[in-house]
Amino acid sequence: MPAIDQFTYGWLTPALAYLLSVIGSLLALRCMARARTSPKPRGWIITAAVALGGTGIWVMHFIAMLGFSIHGATIRYNIPITLLSAALAIVVVWVGLWVVVRRHGEPASLLTGGTATGLGVAAMHYAGMYAMKSNAAMEYDPWMVLLSIAIAIVASSAALWFALHVHGILASIGAAMIMGVAVCGMHYTGMYAMHTHLSDQMHMPSGAPAQQLLTPLIIGVSMVTILLFLQVGITDPDEPDLSSIRGQHASRYWPSRD
């Protein structure tokens, strides 16, 4: 059985993955803070989904995968499936945010939105793993896979709760750091579930080496991050308490249920 190395470049890729996850989570929280005070929050919710799903989750996964290697085996990536996994991450986060926004943060909506988003995040992770092709056969421990899915659901539920309740830049930074730990924890738990073995029946994989995707990824993420920071900034919006959002004034800040 060939050895799997999650730290090919030492702690560089895990540290970068965590940093990007925190940045994406922070941007998403600031976008949701703006959504709470906007009469038309749809644009902010979409921006939050791009920040959290795109940067905080998908890019974190990809950067972490740059440090993944299988000794004695070649790894390639199917680009269409990889990009599809990015779209999946953004869409499932948007669905989760939209559910809790329309239901004004009710416990049932957090449970529903967190479960749906967590399952989607797990699907994104394993779609990204399916996009990874190798001449080593890959198998998964089903119990560890279930554990990674449970972590994804808990992390997603916490993220949605933070999105509705966190106020202030310092609180947002703290929440983003916690979210980064949860997202990275789900990723590495899912990776720990993998086992590989070499087989004469496996062929040399087709696709792009990870390094060929790195340059456009860094450029794309940098541009999106800069644009989001320019759009959102780090100043506190003049936002009301959550209690004032509910009830008779809810329609001012949140979309109607109709």
Image (cartoon, rainbow, N blue to C red):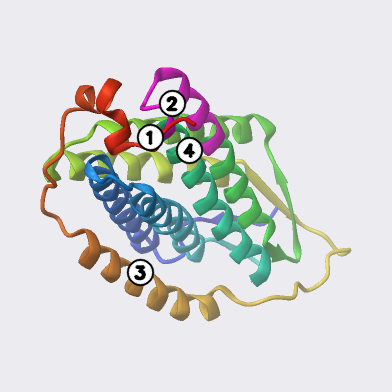
Spot occupied by residue 222 in the image (x, y as percentages of width and height): 33, 73
First of labels 1, 2 by sequence position? 2
The amino acid type of the residue labelled 1 equals Leu
Mark pair 1, 2: CA separation: 7 Å
123 left or right, relative to 54: right
The amino acid type of the residue labelled 3 equals Val
Residue at the spot of label 4: 96
Q: Are marks 2 and 3 in contact (CB under 8 Å)?
A: no
The amino acid type of the residue labelled 4 equals Gly
Mark pair 4, 1: CA separation: 7 Å
- Whether 148 is drawn above or below 35: the answer is above
Residue at the spot of label 2: 110
Q: Are marks 3 and 4 in contact (CB under 8 Å)?
A: no
Residue 78 visible at all: no
Q: Are marks 4 and 1 in contact (CB under 8 Å)?
A: yes
At 47% from the left edge and 19% from the top edge, which residue is drawn? 108
The reply to whether the magenta stretch includes residue 214 is no
Which label sits on residue 160?
1
Residue at the spot of label 3: 224
First of labels 3, 4 by sequence position? 4
Spot occupied by residue 65 in the image (x, y as percentages of width and height): 51, 61
Spot occupied by residue 241 in the image (x, y as percentages of width and height): 17, 28
Mark 2, Cα crowd under 10 Å, few <14 / some 14-19 / many 20+, is many
Magenta residues (range): 102-117
Circle 4 SS class: helix
